[in-house]
Image (tube, helix red, strand yellow):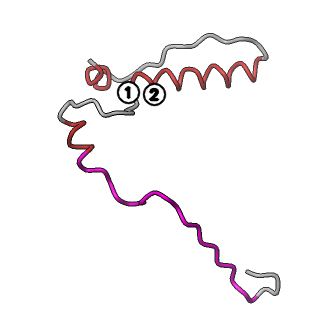
């Protein structure tokens, strides 16, 4: 509601990317084993999560914290091979 209580506030935002349009060609190529330029690997994601967890733990403890292993389901591990 607006300042007078009766006027609705409408806000619009223009974006540069096309929301809702999936990159099917890239998906097809990746599904067929092609490494895409700029692709983030599953290993990079796992390592990033380890770093974020250690940073959060260090913030709470006030000490330097080591990276801890993350257990992954066997189906994920087999996909990484």
Classify the position of the N terminus by image quarter.
bottom right
What type of secondary structure mainly makes up the magenta span? loop
Q: Residues within 10 Å of mark 1 (few under 14, many from 20)?
A: few
The residues bearing labels 1 and 2 have C-alpha atoms spaced at a distance of 7 Å
Tell me the residue that label 2 is attached to.
45
Identify the element where label 2 is drawn: helix
Is residue 41 shown left or right of residue 65? left
| Label total for image | 2
Identified at 47% across, 19% down, the residue is: 70
Q: Nearer the viewer, residue 44 or 46?
A: 44
Quarter occupied by residue 63: top right
Q: Is residue 4 above or below residue 35?
A: below
Identified at 71% across, 11% down, the residue is: 64
Is residue 29 shown left or right of residue 8? left
Query: Is residue 12 shown in magenta?
Result: yes
Q: Position of residue 69 (x, y in %)?
A: 49, 14
Classify the position of the C terminus by image quarter.
top left
Mark seen at residue 41: 1
Q: Position of residue 38 (x, y in %)?
A: 39, 33
Identified at 58% across, 67% down, the residue is: 13
Identify the element where label 1 is drawn: loop
Query: Is residue 73 shown in magenta?
Result: no
Identified at 55% across, 13% down, the residue is: 68
Magenta segment: 6-25
Q: Position of residue 16 (x, y in %)?
A: 49, 59
Q: Residues within 10 Å of mark 2 (few under 14, many from 20)?
A: few
Is residue 64 shown left or right of residue 15? right
Quarter occupied by residue 54: top right
Task: Give the residue at the far left of this rendering.
Answer: 32
Is residue 28 shown left or right of residue 13? left
Asked if the residue under mark 2 is in contact with the one under mark 1, i.e. CB atoms within 8 Å, the reply is yes
Q: Nearer the viewer, residue 17 or 28?
A: 17
């Amino acid at each position: 509601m607006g300042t007078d209580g009766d006027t609705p506030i409408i806000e619009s935002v223009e974006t540069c990317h096309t929301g809702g349009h999936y990159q099917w060609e890239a998906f097809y190529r990746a599904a067929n084993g092609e490494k895409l330029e700029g692709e983030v690997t599953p290993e990079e994601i796992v390592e990033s999560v380890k770093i974020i967890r250690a940073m959060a733990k260090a913030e709470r403890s006030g000490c330097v914290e080591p990276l801890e292993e993350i257990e992954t389901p066997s189906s994920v591990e087999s996909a990484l091979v």
